[in-house]
Every structure is written in C-alpha cells, then in structure tokens.
Amino acid sequence: VTDTVVDTVAPRTFQNGTTVRPARTIPANFAAVTFQLNCTSGNPASPFAGFANPFSDPAMAITFGMRWSWDGGATFAMSTEGIQHGNPTGVWATDKHGNPVMTPDVRLGLPAISDQPPNTYRAYATLSGGPVSTGLTVTETTVP
Amino acid sequence: MAYTRVQNSGKLQTGSGANLTWTPGAAPTVGNLLTYRTWGFTGAGITYGASDVTDSSGTPKTFTRDAFLNGSASTGASAIYSLVVPSGLTTPVKDTNTGSFRTAIFDEWSGNATTSTLDNTHTNNGAAGTTGTTGTGFNTGANAGLALVSVAQDGGNSNESIATTGTSFTQDVVQQDGNVSQAGAGDERTASVASQTGLVDTWTWVSSVVYHAVIASYNVPSGGAAQDTPELDGRPFGLGGQRQMHQLLA
C-alpha cells in the first residue's frame, strides 16, 4: 500500500463558499483518496473550547469530498463526501485512544455507474457558518 | 428478473465522525432499491439510529433500518438500511450518524420488489476468535434475489484487520484497522434462483476478535426469482410484464 500526498493547501482562513481543487486523473491501482482538513493550526489544541472561530457553532458545517467524472473531467456526475458540523463543546471526534482530533477526514473509494469506474476526480469543500481556519490535504492510496 | 446494480458510491469512510453522503450520477429511478451498509466504532459505543439515513429534503425520505447490532463501549457495530425510491427523493442521500470511525457504501439496485421488499434478516454477535460468520446458515424466502452483509470487528487498540472475507459472497467494500480505524466489510450475493438455504458469509481476522455481523435479504417481484426470463436483443422479454415492455418501448 502506497500513500501519496497529491495536493495540499496551507492553513488559511476560508470564507463561506466552495473551494474546488484541480482535477486529477485516477491512477492505476487506485484504492482510495483521503481528504483531510487540518484545523488545529492557529487554534488551541486543547481543551477545544472557546474558539474565536465557529468550530464550536453547530450551525457551522464543512462538506468535503470528491466529485467524480466519467468523461475525463468534462462533467462531474457524482459526488461522495463527508459533512463535519461544529460542536458546542468544540470536540469533533476522538481517536481510538480517546484523544480529541481536529483533523476531519473522509476516505473515499471508487464509485461506479453500471459497474464502470470514473477516470477523473477533483476534491472540493463547501463551508457554511464560517469563516474557519484550516489547511487541506489530499492523499491517494494505491495498492500494487 | 434478477437484481442488477445500477450505481454505487464506493467506499465512504471517516475517522472523525463526519456525516457520510452520496450524490448519485443520475437521479435514482423511482421504484428501484437504495441500500446502505455500514459499520463502525466509537469509544463510547456506537448506535445506529432508526432514522439515521435519509434524503436531503426538509421532510426527508428515511431509509428503513433493516438489520443492526449496536455496540457498547469499545466494540464495533454494523447495520443495513434500505429504501424503495419514492417520488420526490432528493440527493445527496445521507448517513447523519456521527460515530467516530465508520465505513459504508450506498448502492442503487434494479430488479427489486417494490412492496414487501425485505425478505429476511439475521444478526450474529460473535465471540472472540480468528474467524467469524453471519451464523450457522441463513435461509431466504421464495423470492429473494439479493443478500447483503455488514460486519464490524471489535474496536480494541490493536491491529485486528480482515485477512480474508466473503466466502460465497462478493466483497464490495473493506476497511482494515491498522489501529487507526475500524475493520469490517460489506459483502453481497445476488442470485437468479429462489429460496437459497444455508447461506454463510465468513471472515478470517488477523488476530482474535469479537465481531458484529448482520445479513438481510431482499425480494424480487413475486414469482420473479424462479422465472427464466428470455431476452430479445439482450433485453428481458416476456413474463414480468409491464416493466419489461416499458423497457422495450423506451
């Protein structure tokens, strides 16, 4: 299994709206693509409360994932994604050891239409209830 | 008539409790069957709610939770949901659960019964071991054409990944553990013959685990599973009637 970071956006303040990353051709032996938000930069890592930004506002939501194309990127017919809402306690999730995490992620495999996989994808994120500060990382996983 | 997969979401997985959503490539056809298989883990114990999976409208169309096993603290959980596509369905379709580590897949199927769609279900809460099954044998009814499985292994702090999966079943999606996620699998089996008996899906784990397995079967239209449907120009023709004639006329 090989994980390759293929796209990064350094932490910055995102306003409400949609950010679309460049289209990428799906590589051979593609297994999944992971989209991670790196929200700890510029924010206290603990105790995850009292943020100046809306991470603790339930009205804040970040939809982030992939749009998939079957025609080389001319159109993107399908999308798969996650939605991360703000939490009143400022805690979004914990890792397997019980530690809070501020790196929301989705890991997406290939969808299909009539058993045909797409050939191109692009990452996107839509923010409402912002602004928030975060970075973005897209990682492709291939399996020989 | 047999089940055919129209489209699917591929793997949806989160390690942060994100809602998981899918916008199909084409609007799901009214009367087709949408299914959602999921498994997961969260430290406080994950619960798959009866209304977790919906469409996007303000008055959502809600999937039915057909089979599930919820977990207590530090154990996995698994569930299968379904919805016969109603008119007015809006996308994306969503799993609104916020359990930390969840993996899932949405599918759209054709060839299903539109009433009395669910055939049979079974759950198996397996004890610790290096293998697991859906049970000693799962029997479908006379018109079942599809069996779906979702299995989650225990959520302990070690690598408890799946080594092999899906005896007599097709593995649609799998997630390994690696001590950072939740191992499990979503398997399926389609059949053009009626009344399958003694179905068992099995897995082998990397290390000894407890697990939660659920299985559900779904019907084709009454009498449809036993029919040997003739084809005309590669398209079904004959008994089963209106839908097939509609296809020919389309």
Image (cartoon, rainbow, N blue to C red):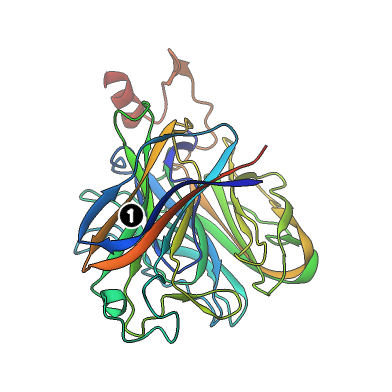
Question: Which sits in the foreground, A13 or B119?
Answer: A13
Residue B90 shows in this picture = no
- Whether residue B124 appears in this view of the structure is yes
Left or right position of B185 against A92: right
From this view, report whether residue B46 is shown above or below residue B207.
below
B83 w.r.t. B26: above or below: below
Identity of the residue drawn at 27% across and 19% down: B249
Residue A110 percent location from the top left of the image: 49, 41
> Would you identify the image quadrant in which residue B76 lies?
bottom right
Secondary structure, mark 1, is: strand
Specify few, some or many for label 1: CA neighbours under 10 Å numbering under 14, 14-19, or 20 or more. Answer: many
Q: What residue sits right under mark 1 in the picture?
A: B93
Mark 1 residue type: Val
Tell me which corner region of the image, top left, top right, bottom left or bottom right, holds residue B55.
Answer: bottom left
Q: Is residue A142 above or below residue A81?
A: above
Q: Nearer the viewer, residue B214 or A8?
A: A8
Tell me the chain of label 1.
B
- Answer with left or right where residue A134 lies relative to residue B160: left
Q: Nearer the viewer, residue A141 or B186?
A: A141
Query: Residue B208 location in percent, x, y?
Result: 79, 68
Say which residue appears at 69% left-offset and 53% top-offset: B201
Residue at x 41% of width, y 75% of height: A92
- Residue B72 relative to residue A52: left or right: right
Residue B13 drawn at (x, y percent): 50, 57
